[in-house]
Image (cartoon, rainbow, N blue to C red):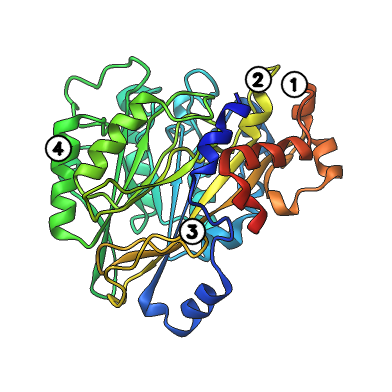
Amino acid sequence: MISELVGIASSILLSVTSVSDEALEQVVDQPQNTVNIIMTGDILLHTPVEEAAVQSDGSINFDSIFVNTRDIISGADLALVNQEVIIGGEDLGVSGYPAFNAPYEIGDALVDSGFDVILHATNHALDKGKNGILNCINFWETNYPDITYLGINDSSKQQDSIYFFQKGNKKIAVLNYTYGTNGIELPSDMPYAVNLLDEDKVRSDIQRAEAEGDFTIVCPHWGTEYNLGISDQQKKWTDIFYEEGVDLVIGTHPHVVEPVEIIHKEGNVHKMLVYYSLGNYVNWTSGTGDGVSDRMLGAIADVNLDISGNAVGAEVTTGGSVISDEDVYIKNYGVDLIVSHVTSGTNGVTVYKLDDYTQELAGQNEIVSQDSDFSLEYLNALSQQVFGDLVNDK
């Protein structure tokens, strides 16, 4: 499957140096004119990940998962994360696959790491039913009222509201939807509980976001699990997002990384950047055999917006990656590649930047017992195949 992506990768316009030296200088000198946005993929809390968070005194602490990437997360103006599993708390029973439920301490760790927006529209949102949704919402609103959570709702009013991040006089909308909830029906008295990819609703939301704001981001939970390519479903929704004027799409759900692409259709000045899948931020699957190693490589989307309004009409370019058809435009974009590192014992699960991952660490990663293909060389080859030769520009 990896070799099939060579043709796709050649067309990807990607700068994996997420922020160039020039862009960094701009951030320092003119921070009011720049917005740095990052997003991580799935926080996928299989049972071994949850067990690794249990400390010797019985308390729970997930900080070790984020310790090696905290600088990327906390350094962003707007940091988003796909919280794959519902945070229903211990009273609903902490559980892994197939019906997940996380303790509240993962929420504490997300906040401590610097995330600003928690995305909850996933296929596992209803794993603990209505109680899971309500417990999760109550956790956020009671403990972290300044943190934004999206994708789950306790009222139709909340579902119809649109979140805007504002810097200066520019407003950036963020919308979050999932393709479904694993066949679990929405609660009869809470049909608004989870944001679904319903075409009429999505189009309406985007139109309002475009009318009220300056830049629109959609974060869809979509695609095909473990597929390194782009599914027909993703193509369909990409067309819909493009038609409605979305500027940036950052997808999750496949549990493996997928290509990055600029959509620019003939006869239309609009340009849209799409990250089809960031893969997992963290996971320790129980699966074995070919393809398991693919799930250990993740990506952090890293996007710089210029909000100065001084580059209307700029052209799409590779490397520098300027995308503009509005006065808020994408100046620079890329990925920070990451690796789930899993070993037995307390705090034995963490995430490294691929640049910092070594042969020694790869040899210690216990996933090798589940897929003998796992190695540093495998991870580097996979990143090359999905993201193309421009990965060498790092």
Q: CA distance from mark 1 to mark 2?
A: 8 Å
Nearer the observer: mark 2 or 4; the answer is 2
Q: Say left or right for 134 vs 18.
A: left
Q: Evaluate if marks 3 and 4 touch, with contact meaning CB atoms under 8 Å apart.
A: no
Q: CA distance from mark 3 to mark 4?
A: 42 Å
Report x, y in % for residue 109: 54, 50
Mark 2 surroundings: few (<14), some (14-19) or many (≥20) residues within 10 A: few
Residue annotated with mark 1? 370
Residue situated in front as seen by the camera: 68 or 228? 228
Residue annotated with mark 3? 318
Nearer the observer: mark 3 or 4; the answer is 3
- So how many labels did they put on this image? 4
Instruction: Using the image, determine if residue 262 lies above or below residue 364.
Output: below
Residue annotated with mark 2? 286
Q: Amino acid at mark 4?
A: Ser
Query: Tag 4's secondary structure?
Result: helix
Residue annotated with mark 4? 156
Q: Evaluate if marks 1 and 3 touch, with contact meaning CB atoms under 8 Å apart.
A: no
Q: Amino acid at mark 1?
A: Gln
